[in-house]
Amino acid sequence: MATKKRKPKRKLWRILPSIRQLFFVGLVAFGLGVLALSFSVRVTAVPAPSEISVAQTSILYYDDGVTELGRLGEANRVSVEMAQIPLLAQQAILAAEDRDFYNHGGFSIRGISRAIYTNLTGASGAGGGSTITQQYAKNAYLTQERTLARKYRELVLSIKLETIVAKDQILNDYLNTIYFGRGSYGIATAANQYFDKNVVELNLAESALLAAIIQAPNGLAPEDNLERLTNRWNYVLDGMATQGWITAEERSNVQFPAIIPNQAVNIFGGPQGYLIEQVRQMLFEKGVTEDQINLSGLRVITTFNKVAQDALINAVLEEGPTENIEGLRIGVASVRPETGEVVAIYGGADYLVNQLNNATQMIGQAGSTFKPFTLAAALENNVTLATTFSGLNKTMVDNYEVINYGDRSYGDQITLLSATEDSVNSAYVELANLVGREVVFEAAKRAGIPADAVGMEPNLAFTLGTTSPNVVDIAAAYATFASRGLQVSPAYIKSVTASSGEVIFKLTPKPVQAFSTDIADTVNFALQKVVTAGTGRAAKALGRPVAGKTGTTNDNKSALFAGYTPELATAVMFVKDGPDGQPVTLSGTGGLQKVTGGSYPARIFTAYMKGALADKPVTKFAPLPTGAPDGANPTSIPTTEAVPTAAPGVEAPAVIPVAVPDLTGKSISQALSLLSGANLLGNFVMSNGTPLPANTSALVVVSQNPVFNSVVTPGATIMIVVQ
């Protein structure tokens, strides 16, 4: 039987490529890869950093410019220059994330190899494969997606960055953008969140801890995994010693740092939220946009004073009612005379619960706190504190029956001073009728009550406070008397500075002389008597000269106390909302049958002023002027500068009035020329309410107030409407 020939087997080594072939293919592939990478680097332009990566927190400060009130922004970040970051902190970051940073060109073969080894073996301690440049490229320019395409773009960008940006700048940018946990982006914010320190104050232990956290901000949070964080902290310190950045002695002596508790507080929570929102709204009014607030790192110094604000909150808590308070609203505002700076407000207990600001938005009838405006108008028109009026309840004035509070009569005829002390309605309605309703109305506006306040109508009841202004408006109007007649609008912001250092806004108060000093001093004398002998006796406990006025409506739907010292003017208002949101009586609140301005409101006022003025020297009011008050014929437009009262025995120079020129039909430049020649000022506004355009050459005057040939005091401001 014939045997079958077998086919010879092909040897396996003849089928497989040789080592030389593999090496050649690998070399070609590597070369092509390098060429592709080089081409990509050459043609790639570094994009602008993503908006969120460079966003900085806007910080609001109290009036000292140092104490922080709150932060606004999408990312809690504060960028700093490299010179502000301690060298040890820089080295700690390098020890943790990229020890060869100053030696590589954007990527590290050693780092990539270490990352592969770590992933395969599960080893801990060593960092990942990305260099600091790669991490910065990912955070600043790319997304966080885990794809090969994104990783390739990261590599290309990191190499490109290294060719056009200095190493120190890359490290600086990285330190300002990397996330440290606790909502903190950048090392400056992290220093504050973990140690309540400025970044320049970081020591070795603290620097190493912040560096350790970068690897896994959530997984290494001290609240959840202190042991793992400690291990990573030791790894960073060992690396610093290995690199020669710290000595062996420094390494052995360093102690784990104390970390402050994580306080994840909503900045809008509690009474503070009303302050922050008020400032935010004022920034909008000044032309600052939402994006600027959230992303641009503004530094805003507010007018709020930390001592005064704390004293106000304590006063409400300690002196406010505690029973039958459902629906109760308490609003308080405190203003610095002559500058209009609002130093403290109480808008409510918690902004997150109710966003209506009781100090700046809530309204309630002002009651008898409006009587001082009638008093000032009367003094300007030859009425004195000794002039008498009816004190009888149900006095008829021009077919209007006047009801005194509590249906009480005070005698057939009482002096104006007595009527002020006891807040007698009958006398004040007679007074308003005598002086003129429009005159009283204009006096209130000159003091600072807005013309568009709810219920602003020149009727007989106006003097009894039928108008419903905001609390801050009453405080600001009383500040006019405290500053001896100088009126200035309330302000909440002292300055706004951009992250570049450019000053965007700076408060420059422009007080106007709404009442002569003699008139204001006489009002101040009468309102001091309200405290020492009248309805505001609770404020005597302040222990320093104080003037004030109670306000209580006959239906007891509002109760107020407004008062002042030469340093501060403060108004406190109580109103109460029913289930339907409509005002209801305060009766029964805090266990009182009737809540008057002299009860809880006056007590809160007194407690607050004690705290706010605790370290301030006692200042006395100017004395009551002798003879007839100077100011019997006030102008309807206040002067732009204070008219000083002459020293005793020195005759004041005569003020010669001027006639208002005819501005109608004139251009703005022509109108300014005419005003300058008459020693007057102009306030130009568009007829449609929009801001004046950049180019005003085509605009002409369509109306003016006061009108042509009106007689005013030199320096007065003329309201001019153009279109």
Image: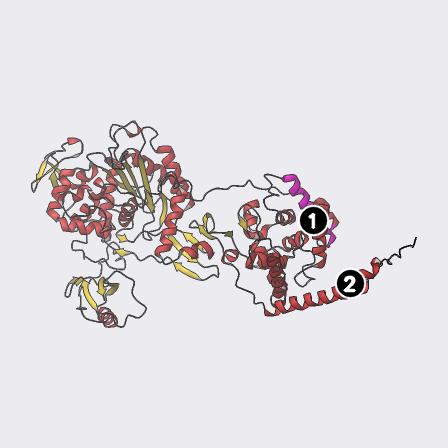
- Residue 691 in the image: state x and y as whole percent: 29, 62
Looking at the rendered image, the quarter that the C terminus falls into is bottom left
Amino acid at circle 1 = Asn
Q: Is residue 526 left or right of residue 153?
A: left
Query: Can I make out residue 238 in this image?
Result: no
Task: Pick the residue in front: 414 or 169.
Answer: 169
Which secondary structure type mostly characterizes the magenta part of the structure?
Answer: helix
Indicate whether residue 236 is drawn in magenta: yes
Element carrying mark 2 = helix
Label 1 and label 2: CA atoms lie apart by 27 Å
Residue type at mark 2?
A: Leu
Rendering coords of residue 485 (x, y %):
25, 52
Q: Residue furthest right?
A: 1
Q: Is residue 677 magenta?
A: no
Looking at the image, which is closer to me, 654 or 229?
A: 229
Disc on the earlier residue, 1 or 2: 2
**Magenta segment, which residues?**
222-247
Q: Nearer the viewer, mark 1 or mark 2?
A: 2
Between 722 and 605, the residue placed more toward the observer is 722
Residue 591 image offset from top left, x and y in percent: 29, 27
Q: How many numbered marks appear?
A: 2
Q: Secondary structure at mark 1?
A: helix
**Mark 1 — residue?**
119
Pick the front one: 177 or 128: 128
Task: Indicate the quadrant where residue 152 lies.
Answer: bottom right
Instruction: Kindly identify the residue that appears in the image at 41 percent across and 55 percent down.
Output: 290
- Residue 235's x, y, as percent? 70, 47
**Residue placed under numbered mark 2 in the picture:** 22
